[in-house]
Image (cartoon, rainbow, N blue to C red):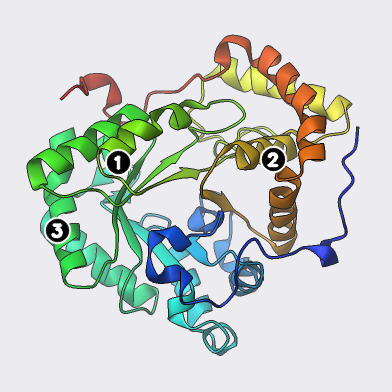
Amino acid sequence: MALLTPPIEALRPVGPVRSNMLTASLDGLPPLVLGGAQFNHQYNADPFSLPVKDIIKKCFQAGVCAIDTSAYYGPSEILIGEALADPEISSAYPRDTYFIITKAGRIAESHFDYSASWMRQSVERSLTRLHTSYLDVVYAHDVEFVPIEGTLEGIAELFKMKEEGIIRNVGISGYPVPVLVTLAKLVKQRLGKTIDIVLSYCNFTLQNRRLKSSLDDFYSAGVKKVLNGSPLSMALLRSQPPHAFHPAGPELKNRVALAAKYTASKNIELADLALRYALSHWNGTTVVGWSNLGEVEAGIQAYWDSQNLDVQKEDHDLVEEVNRILGASLDEVWLSGLQQNYDYVL
């Protein structure tokens, strides 16, 4: 069952292009955000060889007017900053027509620093790397790896920088949804502030839908936007084997491999089905990483396919069978950081 799609030339933007009205608030975030984690050695052996400028240009042309990166993602901020400063992009897309989103607090795989001094230093370095005077969003990055109250000093400093106009929105990011919900509530209680935006990854996918059921908890804590990151679960949901660093257990990886074989027998790549599923069932913004122009074009096309009712009907039976194959691994999560050592009840 192959899905019929229009040629790439027929791709249309997912939102307005070059509009500074959209970037005035988080309500202007497009349905897709370009994820900068791909511009890192973790996902690509030589990120400096990637066509970062062309990828960003293609995204902006397609209405994907937001980029998500991190100080932790190796050379990602540097590569993105150089691309944005290139006259070909800077002349066509003024700074107020796109969002720059980055993160602070995670320094290395096992090194975190949420002190006020480091968070400020990290943000100032990001401003330099990204060639900008302000950042639309800064997340406290992977908050589950330090004791939950240990993040508050750094988050308070982010709010100070928001008051100074350096940051427009303060966010938190991480994997375990209960940690993110509890921290958002704790910030409101202890700091008297409300987290503007939350990013959780791998928690609304074809394999795991937990994020959606927690939206009311986030909104009750004053959060304005909740973004879904990594709809392919850090490249787990595809026909190729996952990266060696992927934290999923062997049983989940095995069941995903069986699901990929099944969809292949129907002439459908699991990654394509998984992306369409996440985009069609998530009512908000999704962060997706692309490493080349072909992936950008395929991702934009997947977005429009995901909004097509006929395609949704064709995908339905495939999704049901994948759910059956996943079995007990459906909605399974893995432990991350200090999640297992804390009772996240206020």
In the rendered structure, the answer to whether residue 209 lies left or right of residue 187 reads: right
Local packing at callout 1 (Cα closer than 10 Å; few below 14, some 14-19, many 20+) is: few
Nearest-to-viewer mark from 1 and 2: 2
- Residue at point 62%, 29% (across, down): 206
> Which amino acid, mark 3?
Glu
Do tag 2 and tag 3 residues touch (Cβ < 8 Å)? no
> Which amino acid, mark 1?
Ser
Query: Which residue is more in the foreground, 270 or 308?
Result: 308
Residue 161, image x, y percentages: 18, 66
Label 1: element kind: loop
Q: Which label's residue is closer to the chain start, 1 or 2?
A: 1
> Which amino acid, mark 2?
Arg
Whether residue 40 is visible: no
Q: Which label's residue is closer to the chain start, 2 or 3?
A: 3
- Residue at point 27%, 40% (across, down): 143
Label 2: element kind: helix
Do tag 1 and tag 2 residues touch (Cβ < 8 Å)? no
- Residue at point 17%, 43% (across, down): 151
Residue at the disc numbered 2: 276
Residue 35, image x, y percentages: 52, 55
- Residue at point 47%, 77% (across, down): 20
Nearest-to-viewer mark from 2 and 3: 2
Whether residue 304 is visible: yes
Residue at the disc numbered 1: 110
Label 3: element kind: helix
Above or below, 299 against 281 in this view is below
Q: How many marks?
A: 3
**Gap between marks 2 and 3 measured at Cα:** 38 Å
Nearest-to-viewer mark from 1 and 3: 3
